[in-house]
Amino acid sequence: MPGFGITLGYTLLYLGLLVLLPLGALIAKASGIGLSGIIAVAVEPRVAAALWTSFSISLVAAAVASLFGLLVAWALTRYDFPGRRIVDAIVDLPFALPTAVAGIALAALYAPNGWVGSFLEPLGLKVAYTPLGIFVALVFIGLPFAVRTVQPLIADIERELEEASALLGASRWRTVWSILLPPLLPGVLTGFALAFARAVGEYGSVIFIAGNLPYVSEIAPLLIVIKLSEYDYTGATVIATIMLAISFTALLVINLLQAWSRKRFGYV
Amino acid sequence: MQSRFLQGRFLDVAGESRLSPLRSVVAALVIGASLLTLSGAASAQTQLLNVSYDPTRELYREINQAFADEWKAQTGEAVNVRASHGGSGAQARTVIDGIDADVVTLGIPSDIDAIAKATKKIPADWRSRLPNSSLPYTSTVVFLVRKGNPKGIKDWDDLVKPGIQVITPNPKTSAGGRWNFLAAWGYSHAKDGSADKAKDFVTALYRNVPVLDTGARGSTVTFAQRGLGDVLPAWENEAFLVLDEFGRDKFEIVVPTLSILAEPPVALVDANVDAKGTRKVAEGYLKFLYSDKAQAIFAKHHYRPSKAEAAKPEDLAALPNLKLFTIESLQGNWDDIQKNNFDSGGLFDQISKR
């Protein structure tokens, strides 16, 4: 295996220095209060409420981003229309924009006196400064992940497959359901996992639109910042460790799902 | 034919100008060395870092320039004061985590206490080292309401009425938020003379808060730009700034009958100035804050100068006249004030339980 030694060595060094070392330090700091202490923090009503807010909204937002990301990716890959490349580039903007800028822009738009908010307000729909605002921000930052992970898979689908399916008498829905979607599933799941992971850790864009009320619209990363403001470094690392554990479990489950979908549908 | 000819020429030119590896190394060294000399020249000028809180950007821009001029005139030395701004607590944390601040000018005494306690870079008795308990200026909390005061807000009692929306930052993350909290508590305590009643009062007030921003500037934006809420209890200087920035035809200031004497203190970071050898300049800077010139600048930016006679009369006249109380007279020393109100499990945590 030529190159195995050097690439593996580099991988281990890189992961060790850049990922495991800081995470290890985090967990070491948090474990100072012991497992019972960590659990006590996790079930504290305010922490539990913030964790619930963060993870539940991230989950829904990632799901919505994946669904619409799939549509966007399909439109951008399958069809040629004027301005396609520009639209394609726009998809990446949420990546490039400083998240605080995104948050401020979204808050300005969806505030009761904003361009969008002023139309929603009479309908009794409040977006900015409510959990719904968090959802909007998280869908926004999740979209590029959902689009970019499925785009190459859509490009790889051979048109002949669809034609064969149609010739064999399958309906359009059946073709979509049985021929087109299965090979895309791993990509959709990857996009979902990335969008979810990003959403859980997101701070900048959310903080400006969330309202940040304890028990209502307070996200777990804000609680970490609040703990730091109290100079409670242990408390902050404990919440971070809890988030890490939940995220890791969730990503593991998604990875298993992916493996299962590959096996089930026989695609790589 | 022509294009190939041009291409050839172009390549030739590129070939001529391409540096040999040795030459490029030499060139890089020369450039690097000249950059070093440049930065060496720049560092002959003393650099001071003032780590400050959020609403003082405009203030310290002017103060720092005035000090540089003054220092140059007095000693002939050039000095450049940089200021860093952010939430008071977050700024204190950057100093704790090692930023080489020469002086700190923060929003609330407890944030400097936190640096003193966590790092010992500032001695515990820092407040007694400078005049007026290390307060070159003070401020207070007043209300900003929308033009015409549509909800008829006159005093703190109006902020706890049902249906009134109050915009104030999170006291956990913002010094301004802490002053607002303490001002409301102190008002109720002065009126009813009971800590229990005061707790009910702040509970009712924070139930009227639809958004808890992380900093005072954030709350100002929420209120002034996003159009949320009926009243913004704010730093006095911030309230005036909104009038100047957004127009006196959109907002007005309501002065409550009683408010808090807000005390944003300053301190030398001893360990840092000794390590950097900037003690003399840094001490000169802090002394300058008490000079007539600086005092006049404070008043111009709507802070309350400790030496009123140094300020322009019209700047002083612009500051509303109201009764001020100190929180120390009600709650004792700052260790207790911070612990009982804002630390984990303190009064603010108790009242935000649902």
Image (tube, helix red, strand yellow):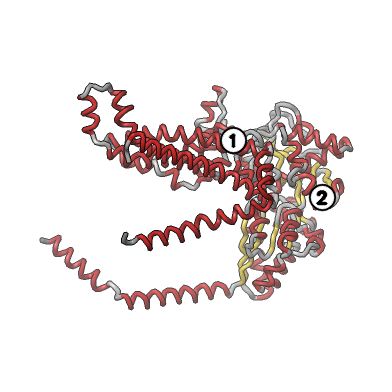
Q: Chain of mark 1?
A: A
Q: In front here: A178 or B9?
A: A178
Does residue A129 sit above or below B8 in this rendering? above
Please determine if labels 2 and 1 lie on a single subunit: no
Residue pictured at 77% horizontal, 36% vertical? B202
Does residue A132 sit above or below A190 in this rendering? above
Q: Is residue B244 visible?
A: no
Residue A203 location, quadrant = top right
Residue pictured at 77% horizontal, 52% vertical? B263
Quadrant holding the N terminus of chain B: bottom left
Drawn side of residue A160 relative to residue B75, left or right: left
Label 2's element?
helix
Q: Which residue is mark 1?
A: A53
Residue lying farthest to the right in this orientation: B193
Q: Which mark is residue B168?
A: none
Quadrant holding the C terminus of chain B: top right
* Cβ atoms under marks 2 and 1 closer than 8 Å: no
The residue mark sitting in front, 2 or 1, is: 1
Residue pictured at 34% horizontal, 41% vertical? A88
Q: Which mark is residue B336?
A: 2
Name the amino acid type tagged 2. Answer: Asp
Residue lying farthest to the left in this orientation: B1
Residue A188 location, quadrant = top left
Q: Residues within 10 Å of mark 1 (few under 14, many from 20)?
A: many
x then y, percent, for residue A215 = 65, 34
Q: CA distance from mark 2 to mark 1?
A: 33 Å
Label 1's element?
helix
Q: In front here: B220 or A248?
A: A248
